[in-house]
Image: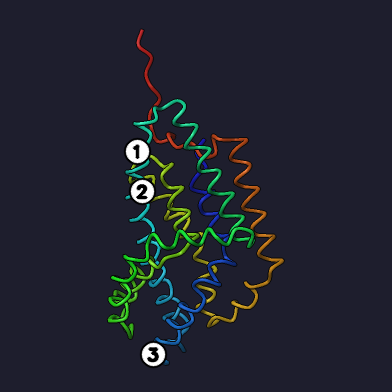
C-alpha cells in the first residue's frame, strides 16, 4: 500500500509554522497589494489568494516531475531490489531531517536554499514586473514564480522526490505536499500576516517537528508506506 501522497500532505500540513514564518510576509504583502475594493469582497479576496497558491503548487508539481525523472533513472541504476530499499530509507531520512529543521534543531538544513539562488535571481525581477496583480491569471502567474522562491523545506522535500519513480509520481508527491501547506498560507493571507507571531512560538515548533520526526521513523519501520514502486505492475510469473 502506497501512502506516500497522504504522508507528503501531512508533512505540508504540519509544516505550517515554517510556512507562516517563510511565506507570511509575502502573503501579507500580496494581500495588501490587491485593490482595496477587492480586499473588502471576501469571496473575491479568497479567490485571489487561492489563485496565488495554485500557481505556487503548480511550480512544486513541475519541479517534482523533473526530480521524479531522476528517481526513475536512479532505480534503474541501483536495481529494483536493494535499490528500492535504499530509496525508501532515504525518503524516511529526509522526513526526519525536515522534522529536525522545523523544530529548530537543524538550522543548517536551510543551506540547501543556495541550490536555487541562481534561478531565483533570474525569476525575481519577472515577479516584480507582474505587480500590481489585478486579475486571476496574473495572480496564478505570480504564484508560479513565487513557487520557485528558495526554501529549505521545499527543497528538502524535492530531494526526497528522487525516491518517486517517474515524472507523474514526482509531480503528484510535490502537489500533495503543496496542498498540505495551503491552509496555513491562505489563512496567513486572510489574516494579513497576524499568524506570524504564533508561528514563532518555540514550543509549537518543537511539537510540530517531533510529529514529523515520528512520521519519518514510522516509515522506517513500515517502509511500504513509501513504496516507490507502487505504480509498477507486479511481474507476471512465466510457467
Crowd tier of the residue under label 3, counting other residues whose Cα lies within 10 Å: few below 14, some 14–19, many 20 or above: few
Please tell me which residue is depicted at 60% across the width and 61% down the height of the picture. 102
Front residue of this view, candidates 17 and 31: 17
The quarter of the displayed image where residue 48 is located: bottom left
Q: Nearer the viewer, residue 58 or 200?
A: 200
Q: Count residues near mark 1 (Cα–Cα under 10 Å), then give few for <14, some for 14-19, many for 20+.
A: many
Say the numbered circle drawn on residue 87: none
* Dot in front, 2 or 3: 2
User: Mark 3 — residue?
Assistant: 35
Mark 3 to mark 1: distance in Å?
A: 46 Å
Q: Is residue 20 left or right of residue 113?
A: right
Q: For the image shown, how many numbered marks are present on the structure? A: 3
**In the rendered image, the vertical position of residue 74 relative to residue 42, given as above or below:** above
Residue depicted at 40% across the width and 25% down the height: 234
- Is label 2 in a helix, a strand or a loop? helix
Labels 3 & 1 near each other (Cβ < 8 A): no
Query: Disc 2 versus disc 3: distance between alpha carbons?
Result: 38 Å
Q: Earlier in the sequence, mark 1 or mark 2?
A: 2
Please tell me whether mark 1 sits on a helix, a strand or a loop. Answer: helix
Tell me if residue 52 comes above or below residue 219 in the rendering: below
How far separated are the C-alphas under marks 1 and 2?
A: 9 Å
Residue reaching furthest to the top: 239
**Dot 3: element:** loop
User: Which label lies toward us, 3 or 1?
Assistant: 1
Q: Which mark is residue 72?
A: 1
| Above or below 202: residue 88 | above
Q: Is there a contact, CB below 8 Å, between mark 1 and mark 2?
A: no
Q: On the image, which quarter does residue 131 sit in?
A: bottom left
Label ID, residue 67 = 2
Picture coordinates of residue 127 (x, y %)? 31, 76
Quarter of the image containing the C terminus? Answer: top left
Q: Earlier in the sequence, mark 2 or mark 3?
A: 3
Amino acid at each position: 500500500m502506497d501512502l506516500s501522497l497522504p504522508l507528503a500532505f501531512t508533512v505540508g500540513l504540519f509544516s505550517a509554522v515554517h510556512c507562516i514564518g517563510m511565506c507570511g510576509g509575502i502573503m501579507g504583502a500580496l494581500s495588501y497589494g490587491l485593490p482595496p475594493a477587492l480586499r473588502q469582497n471576501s469571496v473575491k479576496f479568497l479567490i485571489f489568494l487561492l489563485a496565488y497558491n495554485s500557481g505556487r503548487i503548480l511550480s512544486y508539481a513541475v519541479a517534482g516531475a523533473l526530480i521524479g525523472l531522476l528517481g526513475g533513472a536512479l532505480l534503474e541504476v541501483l536495481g529494483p531490489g536493494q535499490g528500492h530499499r535504499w530509496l525508501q530509507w532515504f525518503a524516511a531520512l529526509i522526513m526526519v531531517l525536515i522534522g529536525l529543521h522545523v523544530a529548530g534543531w537543524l538550522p543548517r538544513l536551510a543551506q540547501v536554499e543556495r541550490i536555487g539562488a541562481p534561478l531565483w535571481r533570474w525569476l525575481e525581477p519577472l515577479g516584480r514586473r507582474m505587480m500590481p496583480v489585478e486579475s486571476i491569471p496574473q495572480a496564478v502567474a505570480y504564484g508560479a514564480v513565487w513557487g520557485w522562491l528558495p526554501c529549505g523545506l521545499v527543497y528538502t522535500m524535492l530531494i526526497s522526490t528522487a525516491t518517486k519513480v517517474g515524472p507523474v509520481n514526482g509531480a503528484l508527491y510535490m502537489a500533495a505536499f503543496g496542498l498540505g501547506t495551503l491552509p496555513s498560507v491562505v489563512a496567513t493571507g486572510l489574516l494579513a500576516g497576524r499568524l506570524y507571531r504564533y508561528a514563532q512560538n518555540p514550543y509549537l515548533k518543537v511539537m510540530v517537528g517531533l510529529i514529523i520526526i515520528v512520521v519519518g521513523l514510522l516509515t522506517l519501520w513500515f517502509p511500504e508506506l513509501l513504496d516507490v514502486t507502487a505504480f509498477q505492475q507486479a511481474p507476471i510469473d512465466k510457467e
